[in-house]
Structure formats: C-alpha cells, structure tokens
Image: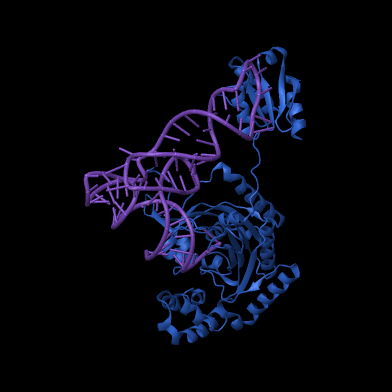
Amino acid sequence: MSLRAVKGMKDILPDEISKWHRLEDAFRARAALYGFREARFPIVEPTALFVRSIGENTDIVEKEMYTFTDRGDKSLTLRPEGTASSVRAYIQHNVQALEPVTKWFYVGPMYRRERPAKGRYRQFYQAGIEVFGDPGPYVDAEVIDMVVGFISSLGITQVEVLINSIGGPETRANYRDALLGYLEPYRSELCSDCQRRMDANPLRVLDCKVPRCSEIAADAPSILSHLVDADRAHFDTLQKTLTLLGTPYRVEGSLVRGLDYYTRTLFEVLGKGEGLGAQNALLGGGRYDQMVKSLGGPDTPAIGFAMGLERLLMAMPSEPDPTHVDVFIVAAQASVRSEAALLGRELRDAGLRVESDLRGGSLKSQLRRADKMSARIAMILGESEVENGVVQLKDLEQKTQDEVSRAEAAKRAKAILG
RNA sequence: GUGGGUGUAGCUCAGUGGUAGAGCACUGGAUUGUGGCUCCGGGUGUCGCGGGUUCAAUUCCCGUCACUCACCCCA
C-alpha cells in the first residue's frame, strides 16, 4: 500500500479508544479536584515562540521541529510541547490581570521529528498542567503530589519520582563558573556533543550518557552545593512538604532535562514496570520562573509538567473492553425487516444501545452476530410476533427467552441490563 | 543522525531452488424460526519492491523501501 500514515504517526482505532478515554477522563477528573481548568491551544505556532522558550541549543529546536513556511513568508512550527503555547496564551490574553494565580491543563498531540522507537512517536499525545503566578515551593509540592497520585490511581505502581533543583539565575551563574572550572581540564576527553554543550549549556554535560562523559560528570561539583540561600530554602521546603504529604521521591542531582527554560525545581517520573521499553520517562516538568517575562509578559513565576499519554497507556494494566451493545434485534423473516427497524427506533428512543444486522441473513447467523458483539439481549421479531404485537426477548447470558409485548420490551430489557 | 532485527493470507506465524501452508478471524451449513461448544465446507496471497545468479527464486546474492528495537534525546 502506497498511502500510509506518516512514519511515527499512528491511527488509534476503536479497539484501543476506550483505554484512551479512561486515561483522559481520569486526568480531567483529577485536574478538576485540584482546581485546574482546561485550555486548548493551536497546534501550529510561530517558530520563534519555540526557539525563544525552549532554547536555541536544545535538541528539540536544533533538529526535531516540524517547521515550514506557509503561503506567505511566515515560519510556522507544529508544536513540539505545550508549555510555550500556554505561556504565549497567558501573555496574549492578559490573564495576570484577571486572577493572581492561574491553573490550566491541556491534552493534545505534539510533534517531534525523531527516530521512532517503542514509546516514542513523531505525533504523540501529552497531558499537562501549568500554574502561573505562584512562586512556590508549596505549589511545587502540590503539583508533584497531584501527578504522582494520579499515576498511581491509573494502577501504575512501579514508578520512581526524581526531583532536583537547578536554582535561579544567581545560582546558575555561580555554578556555571564552578562547573566550567572543573570541566575545562577534561575538555578534550569529552564527546563532541559535550564539548559543544560546554559553551552552549554546560549543565547538560551532566546528563550525557557517553561512558567517559558520565565518569567525568560523576565527580563534578554538584549544583545542589552551589544553591544560593533563597534557592536552597525553596528546595528544602519542597522536600519537607513532599515528605509530609507522603510522596516518595529521590533527589537526583544529575537531573537536568533538555529544555533551557527551567529554573529551580525539576522533576521526572520514571516507569519501572514491564512493557515500557527504553523510553521510560512518564512525565517531566519543573519551574520556569523566567519564561513569561522573557517572552514579553509580566514577571510571573510558573511551574508545570507534561505526561506522555502513550507511555502511560503502555504502563497501565489493561481492562476488558466494555460492551457497546445492549440489544440485538433479529428479523426472523425478510418480510419483517422494516418492522424490525421500527422496533430499533423505539428501543433507541428509550436509551438502549441497539444493533442489528440490516443485511438480513439466517436466524442462526443473526444470533451468532449478536453473540460476537457481546449483546446481552436479543429480540427476535417474526411474522407472528408482528401480528400479535410482541417480541421474543432472549437473555443471551441466562439463556432464557420470554414473549413480551412491544410496549413492555424496553422496560424489560432495562430490568435485565440493570 | 548511528547500529541491529524483521518483511509470506485480515491477524499471528510455518515452509521449500521447481510459483505456498497452519491456527485465529471471517463466512455457509449440520431437517421446518434460536447464539456461545462441536463437526463439515468456503475464499483470499503480485511470498515488500527492484536487480543479479540459475534451466528455474518466495527460497541464494546485492540494492532499496517499510516496519521494528536500541543508541541519542525525551513524553
């Protein structure tokens, strides 16, 4: 077949959709419990939005964005993540004038042109939340606690919560000097990426998986020991609050994340269970206190995270698909098929989910089909039933059959269905 | 971007240098208008694509594309 879905982009067919609904419904419900309200943003944004927020030297901006020129000369990009759009919308609509603290959530597709792998797609779905206007650290703890509770409510129990702090501008400047001082003698031993990172964003050297780089990074000074007092206090209070909430976590000094906009609090939840493959980061997030201002808005602290829905789905225990048919109508003879259509309308008007085989066929084949569809009830209509104003109501699970009047049929069916 | 694996029926896969099979699924039937179990029957494939070797290729070789897994990075 020559026309296929684009590489890394998947169809979600009806057999899978109930699991998606279960996940999305659960997320919306959980977000509402914490006072978050849903927002939806365009999938296409000006390219500059992502370059300026995510950072020019990140992998996303350097090589993963779907960028194109529209029929003018504007450079547009399919959003690779949701936070930048949230911030843009927050600024554009002057939301800070409406309320001191804004709590939004979103669900939708994101686009990154990476090599696909298990748990990594070019179009993938994220659900995320953003809080604007609260400097923390209590809100940091609440956000982390919320999402950890959410994941566990999905039946995903094998997880690890990592947190770190990379401080604010002052800490970053101090630490950058200290780190570069440490790394400089090793410069020639580092991989080429890291040599470049040293100039662009030295923090990311700590994250490198190349063996020699991680050896060198292991002995690097820790950013945690360079936190200025205010950053230190923020991180301590976050930990204290998480502990009080009973949220398990591990401080991971090397947690850096590949987006430039983060400040202070960073966190990530890793799935440890089977079925995830190598892409086991279920969600990632952190504080981005500088971004609103740097994109032209008022100086507004913010924190948020994004979860990968496909990964959550892979980690979730599967449940049998719910049946989607209550009553299957069987026409015993071709002569009553019109009347069967009317019966179907009557039952649907009463709120029952009704299926039938409009193509006709033998009684046996129609009943087989009812069974395949896991219908609980079959209603058989033949010439004599039509004549007498009744139907044969068959409980396919209990294997019982009664003759009931047309007028009673919907009520009897509902009684059986509970 | 780099490596590995795999491409045969709708799905999962077997198979052979002489143009192909199973299970599942789908479908018809097993006495008059009754499902699931059982039994009997039915159809489908450019054997990913292109080239090479050969009397002959789905089978061997090369290339290519697709899918997939890992690295990288991330959700």
Q: Quadrant of the N terminus of chain A?
A: top left
Q: Position of residue A378 (x, y in %)?
A: 68, 27
Q: Is residue A83 above or below residue A413?
A: below
Q: Nearer the viewer, residue B41 or A141?
A: B41
Q: Is any atom of residue A25 visible in this view?
A: yes
| A397 displayed left or right of A118 | right
Q: Position of residue A266 (x, y in %)?
A: 60, 70
Instruction: Tell me what residue is drawn at x 43 percent, y 49 percent.
Output: A6
Identify the colour of chain B in the image. purple
Q: Position of residue A394 (x, y in %)?
A: 71, 26
Q: Position of residue B14 (x, y in %)?
A: 45, 48
Identify the image quadrant of residue A62: bottom left
**Which residue occupies the extreme top position in the image?**
A387
**Chain letter, blue in picture:** A
Q: Nearer the viewer, residue A12 or A377?
A: A377
Q: Is residue A367 above or below residue A28?
A: above
Q: Nearer the viewer, residue A260 or B50?
A: B50
Q: How many marks?
A: 0
